[in-house]
Amino acid sequence: MSEDKLEGAYADTQGDEGPLVGGFSYYAGQDRWTWSPEVIRFHAHPDDRDAVTDQGATRRVLMLGTGSEGSQGAVHLRGQLVDLTTLQEEILNDNLAPVVDDFRAHRAVIEQAKGIVIQLFAVDADEAFDRLRACSQTANVKVRDLAQYLVLAAAQDRTPGKAENTLGLAEILEVLAADADGPSAAGYGEAMEHDTAQQWLDHYVAAWLSYDRDAIGVLFSEDVSYRYHPYEEPITGREAVVASWLGETDDDRAPTRDEPGTYDASYAPVAVDGDVVVATGTSTYRDTAEGPVTQVFGNCFVMRFDDDSRCREFTEYYVKHP
């Protein structure tokens, strides 16, 4: 496919309407790439340097593609690039102040916890933090939560003194967690498993296909924060999310309810990190239940889960296949 055939296939949505989207193709047999004009605007390959308008600038892009086998076994790759640079900058600007405030609020307790570790093991500040971080990774607990737990235990005089201590930091934390008078380490939440994440995604699709109120509600925590689009304010609360799925609200952020038999989907987790799950997949649509597939979307979900494996944060990214 040449660039002139790709031209016009992808709208320039830069600015208020959304990120710039463009198409690309790669032919392995000829080791040849082709790009739509939209991609040329932010593609910085050395061979295309004369065509780049943002020379010297670094763009953040999302690449989605599908492969097929051509003649003589050659692979043909076709897909889209979505320029997320502006969106990323807006998100960073919107969230920078809360992040800074959060950092300041928790820095003091982390410093206190480091002081406790220094006193217990006669190590320097860097080693103290390394030990806290190692324990947090092992227990899948945030450093700041672990620090707060340790400081609270010290204030309650439940940590050993330096002279009588013969335990490592992880062993001390295990003893404190086993103390009936202290909070359980498991209270901070457990990591999602890949299989559990896949089951949740399967239930998500089933709830969408059925539009059953209870099946939708059980997916989400009571205080869920749900975004149909990453650039919008979230819909908050389980009941509000269920109502938006069922078309019981005038909220412009929610899509219209789909007709039975005209849609389907399949998603799978591609990354699981603690309570965070990233999943990708496709959604397909038909004009009528018996008709052919007319639209295909590539989807990416970024989610966080609570201790009951209910989603408490959900953000969807998607792009329409050509």
Image: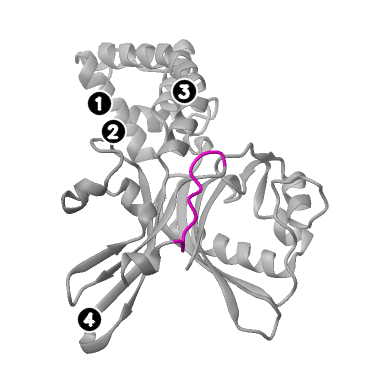
Name the residue rendered at 34%, 47% in the picture: 41
Category of crowding for the residue at label 2, using alpha-carbon neighbours closer than 10 angstroms: few (below 14), some (14–19), many (at least 20): some
Distance, label 2 to label 3, CA atoms, is 27 Å
Compared with 9, 92 (above or below) is above
Category of crowding for the residue at label 1, using alpha-carbon neighbours closer than 10 angstroms: few (below 14), some (14–19), many (at least 20): few
Compared with 278, 169 (above or below) is above
Compared with 29, 168 (above or below) is above
Residue at image mark 4: 74
**Amino acid found under the numbered disc labelled 3:** Leu
The nearer-to-camera label among 2 and 3 is: 3
Distance, label 4 to label 2, CA atoms, is 47 Å
**Amino acid found under the numbered disc labelled 4:** Ala
Name which of mark 3 and mark 4 comes first in the sequence.
4
Compared with 29, 120 (above or below) is above
Residue at image mark 2: 134
Instruction: Give the extent of the magenta segment.
Output: 8-16
Cβ atoms under marks 1 and 4 closer than 8 Å: no
Which labelled disc corresponds to residue 130? Answer: 1
Distance, label 1 to label 2, CA atoms, is 6 Å
Name which of mark 1 and mark 4 comes first in the sequence.
4
Label 2 residue SS: helix
Cβ atoms under marks 3 and 1 closer than 8 Å: no
Q: Which one is nearer the viewer's eye here, 309 or 131?
A: 309
Label 4 residue SS: loop
Residue at image mark 3: 96
Q: Which one is nearer the viewer's eye here, 22 or 95?
A: 22
Name which of mark 2 and mark 3 comes first in the sequence.
3
The nearer-to-camera label among 4 and 2 is: 4
Cβ atoms under marks 3 and 4 closer than 8 Å: no
Tell me if residue 10 is in the magenta stretch: yes
Visible in this render: residue 117? yes
